[in-house]
Amino acid sequence: MSKPLSDHDRKKQISVRGLAGVENVTELKQNFNRHLHFTLVKDRNVATRRDYYFALAHTVRDHLIGRWIRTQQHYYEKDPKRVYYISLEFYMGRTLQNTMVNLALENACDEATYQLGLDMEELQDMEEDAGLGNGGLGRLAACFLDSMASLGLAAYGYGIRYEFGIFNQKIVNGWQVEEADDWLRFGNPWEKARPEYMRPVHFYGRTEHHPDGVKLVDTQVVLALPYDTPIPGYRNNIVNTMRLWSAKAPCDFNLKDFNVGGYIQAVLDRNLAENISRVLYPNDNVAIQLNDTHPAMAIPELMRVLVDEEKLEWEKAWDICVRTCAYTNHTVLPEALERWPVDLFAHLLPRHLEIVYEINRRHLERVAAKYPGDNGRLCRMSLIEEGGQKRINMAHLCIVGSHAVNGVAQIHSDILKATVFKDFYEMEPHKFQNKTNGITPRRWLVMCNPGLAEVIAERIGEDFIRDLDQLQSLRKYVNDEAFIRDIAKVKQENKLKFSVHLEEHYKVKINPNSMFDIQVKRIHEYKRQLLNCLHIITYYNRIKKEPNKQWTPRTVMIGGKAAPGYHTAKMIIRLITAIGEVVNNDPVIGDRLKVIFLENYRVTLAERAIPAADLSEQISTAGTEASGTGNMKFMLNGALTIGTMDGANVEMAEEAGEDNLFIFGMRVDDVDALDMKGYHAEAYYNRLPELKQAIDQIAGGFFSPKQPDLFKEIVNMMMHHDRFKVFADYEDYMKCQEKVNALYKNPKEWTKKVIYNIAGCGKFSSDRTITQYAREIWGMEPTLEKIPAPDDKI
Ligand code: Z16
């Protein structure tokens, strides 16, 4: 019998990880040692694991520099059209492995560190996530950067360099506790400060109207200091730039009326200005400070630059503005649509407010001309909302100031046209488009699931990594016994690996032969983690009722952060942990049902959990989840989806075949009909005994014996004011979960459906999404060509 391969040797055989040539490896080792010495100022006696991580990061980073400079020279010479993706969030996660993947350095670095007596995975684990995002929207921006570079587009990501990213979540006695994310503490090897490109930004003050134009006077200046991060394309030698801005007080900040006592205070007050880029706002889909309308400010700002500084006529400036800007909407939840108080605006940005008023005046003139006498419409379409506190509707500003407005999945784009933006669609139908979201197959397959990428590459080659539609050709292997076995084997390995990780980090014991049923996403009522809870409780009750039946073992994992001010979301987390305490310690249940709350869900945990999933939970109320992108990541990694006809689930079913997903519940039309008729939760509660039992248990303290009233608010919400109609989908969800169990008992049939899903994934590459943005909105043409590689002598 041959000796089993070590983890290191097994990975080396994976071709998608690049070649580990002897010369390469020797050079990498030399550079690693050089950096340990000259950059980290350590020898091997005193170096820590973190030092080794930094030495490796610098070694890999060196391979970016020549490509980065060359790419920018190339853009300067060819002068192609540029695109600026402006986002308040870029949820990048870690950078080291992604850089190695895109530069084909993974095997070579693995070999080099191995020869140095180090374990590369351990070093990678020292890297902090760049958590500059809340969830889907921020991660989408990060996937887009990867695709734009991989498609050779002259693209720049513009955003904010938060000193503190999304909080770290701790679970203490079952409750969420937030901790500051001090991600820059040990330094960031991937960024380069560019103080030479610092820009002044003027706040407050007042406007003076002169015959030769408008002047802003008596302003408070804050400096914007840019930091550049390289964004490598996939094996094409392109390296684009993500430029994140940090707020910096000017030297004379608050020193204008300098006096002896005031100096120290003035220096301390510099923090006030610099607080602008201190911390990411941890709200997703909630009222203020949300970013999908944030290009709104780019519109009056561009107008200000063109009119006040460049002295253009308003009409000319407006034409440029509209042709330049485009707006993506990410939600229809009314509480998430930004409306900024006019008072605040008037104080902070007086000139911008004047400009917004002028935009509105001209906009309403056009509305009135097109719909004479229709005052209701005029009111609805105004950028300024009257009544009580005056507010600016930022979405309206974005629509008016852009030439294109898009939703992020077909169903979502249709809903925008039919409801929230109906008036605007009727007036300017040509502006409205759809761009279904996507994910980058580099991070979300090659990097996080090399075993699966390799099994695929063995059948169809490696080209699918830049052209994901090629996965279609896997359909011819659905009945191929060897392929089915390989796919199932990779899944089992990923499950084992994740079980080990969970046991190490959370001291929980998991049955790796159970179905891994995972719901990971921000905690929100509309995403209906509560529906998942009701399934868990009902399944628990069923096992208890007939303990000798053959139940399909399940490990249900739920993870996600709650916005710190969102009380109900925090109570949902508490309910999940409470259910876990009861279920996991019930001897009758054994390892047939476990409930695990995945603490501190973030990009890096997604990369570990998703490849291990059998079942992906995508169960939002139809019409509420704009797209979802986690759904696509699970599909690409060989999980089956249980989901509603919402967001991109609809298109996933279209691509994989509806029979290959577990679709249940109300469609958007059903939800609307139920709204018309009136949703009465008690009716379902009274009609469905198992639902009643579950609710009575939650309400009666079965899961919180020490505090029987703990969940009474949640129960009251579900029974009396549930905007997202959990009970209305309960019955169909339970039936659908039974079908899931039945299929899981037949591993071969299960895996065939997995193969149909993987084969149907092509559409959900962010390369496809970006190609459509480029052609249909930006007027650019992607290319799969490479630019010449630099000579990397370092
Ligand atoms: C966010 O992540 C999303 C919407 C939003 O208004 C705010 C934030 Cl922080 C999400 C959507 O909920 C999700 O459906 C979508 O896939 C994602 O944005 C990217 O478009």
Image (tube, grey):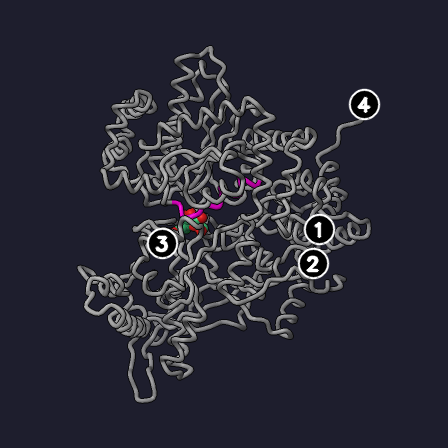
Q: Residue at (69%, 64%) from the top-left corner?
A: 787
Residue at image position (80%, 26%) is 2
**How far apart in space, not on screen, are marks 4 and 3 (Cα)?**
63 Å
Cα distance between the residues tagged 2 and 4: 42 Å
Q: Earlier in the sequence, mark 1 or mark 2?
A: 2
Q: Position of residue 141 (x, y in %)?
A: 50, 55
- Disc 2 is placed on an element classified as helix
Q: Position of residue 674 (x, y in %)?
A: 27, 38
The location of residue 406, given as percent across then percent down, is 42, 58
Q: Which amino acid type corresponds to the residue marked 4 in the rendered image?
A: Met
Q: Could one spot residue 180 in this view of the protein?
A: no
* Disc number lying in front (4 or 3): 3
Relative to 155, is 647 above or below? Answer: above
Q: Which residue is mark 2?
A: 63
Q: Is residue 429 visible?
A: yes
**Circle nearer the viewer, 3 or 1:** 3
The answer to which of 448 and 222 lies nearer the viewer is 448
Assess disc 3: are there few (<14), some (14-19) or many (≥20) residues with their C-alpha within 10 Å of its C-alpha.
many
Q: Which residues are magenta?
A: 625-636
Instruction: Using the image, tell me which numbered label, if any, was put on residue 516.
Output: none
